[in-house]
Amino acid sequence: MSEQVVMRVEPDEAQARWRRYRWQLLYGEAFDPAMQMALDEVLTRRVGIGQRLPTLRFWEWTAPAVVIGRFQSLRNEVDQEMARQHDITVVRRITGGGAMLTEPGKVITYSIYAPPELVAGMSFVESYAFLDTWVIEALRSLGIDAWYQPINDITSAEGKIGGAAQARRFGAVLHHVTMAYDISPQKVVQVLRIGREKLSDKGIRSAERRVAPLRQQTNLPRETITERMLEVFATRHGLEEGRLQPEEIAEAEELVRTKFGTYEWTAILP
Amino acid sequence: MGQEGPSEETEVPVRGEYKTPGGKLVAVEFDVVDGRLHSVQVTGDFFLEPPEALERIAGALEGLPVRQATEELIAKQIRANLDDGVEMVGFSPEAVARAVRRAWS
């Protein structure tokens, strides 16, 4: 195991790196939970081999889901019976981190697929905050008092807004974030098992109080928030309209069949 | 000399958790057979690259003597089993070791 060598990267120099790329935007099309997982792998691979320009993808969901982290135990994180009752699909993503509940129109989820050079010289912890700097700016410009809580939380005085997860794989960096917009904290604790040890250093008593969805903090419609996010990204880094290629969709569909849609993958850590 | 505390054989797996302050949770679950760790599973909301290194971490714990293995020894064992370039983010060999000790103490 290696001790991580971290070079000093000046924040302004690093932020200027975004401008080295022609960022493509994928926005609007909704997919089911397993397909979302598969698209993340396919698009990361494509950026890794240079078949796709660096990309920002905003997700729309066709169905509610619990998404668990690559290294989580299925039965320890999810009340599967409760998930069934609520008609919630359980899927596993390729990044680490914690389980989350998503519902169509009730979360804001996005992925960044980037060349590793964008975060060269940064530790993992530094790169999380770096890749979401534009999001914090967008939220703050809407009057939401948000900040980055290392390692991977977007939080506020009222509670946690969302979490990021990252993988450095297939020659690229995948960084994705889900923020709660209108998720019911009560439902979260019904479906997800959140143990006492996990809250041990958070200084709060209950898991319900941990989550502070954006709608609770602002009266703005979800679209207003995502539009502001796009504006800020475009202004800071540049952004072009992109689209998913048919072969990318086909490749993702195949991955749903062989991996993300299978119980073997979801229960890889039972 | 009579041994107080748990016997050295388990009927159901034991489980211990540890959350690194400011970091992530790691859980270790295992059986004890003839006083040694068996069928070890390491899970949690940590980050790890490459993901396959998880098997090396769990594998490092297989067969360790449950009573004698100190946190220090367990952590050393994990470190020795990991290749250069493995990145553990939000947890550490020491955190895994503490979860093991919590499962069986």
Image: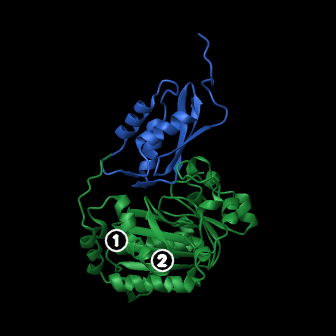
Question: Is residue A106 at all visible to an observer of this figure?
Answer: yes
Q: In which quarter of the image is residue A121?
A: bottom left
Instruction: Name the spot of residue A118 as percent of width and height, x first.
Output: 30, 70
Check the image and report above or below for A73 versus A59: above
The color chain A is rendered in: green
Neighbour class for label 1 at 10 Å: few (<14), some, many (≥20)? Answer: many
Disc nearer the start of the sequence (1/2): 1
Which chain did the image draw in blue? B
Mark 1 vs mark 2, foreground winner is: 2
From the viewer's side, name the closer residue of A130 and B13.
A130
The residue located at (45%, 32%) in the rendering is: B71
The residue located at (24%, 72%) in the rendering is: A13
The residue located at (73%, 68%) in the rendering is: A86
Q: Which chain is indicated by disc 1?
A: A
Q: Check if mark 1 and mark 2 are on a common chain.
A: yes
Amino acid type for the residue under numbered disc 2: Leu
- Secondary structure state at the residue bearing disc 1: helix
Question: Is residue A26 at all visible to an observer of this figure?
Answer: no
Neighbour class for label 2 at 10 Å: few (<14), some, many (≥20)? Answer: some
Instruction: Name the spot of residue A207 as percent of width and height, x first.
Output: 63, 57
Q: Which chain is indicated by disc 2?
A: A
Instruction: Name the spot of residue B91 as percent of width and height, x first.
Output: 44, 48
- Secondary structure state at the residue bearing disc 2: helix
The residue located at (35%, 78%) in the rendering is: A54
Looking at the image, the residue that sits furthest to the right is A85
What residue is pinned by disc 2?
A: A139
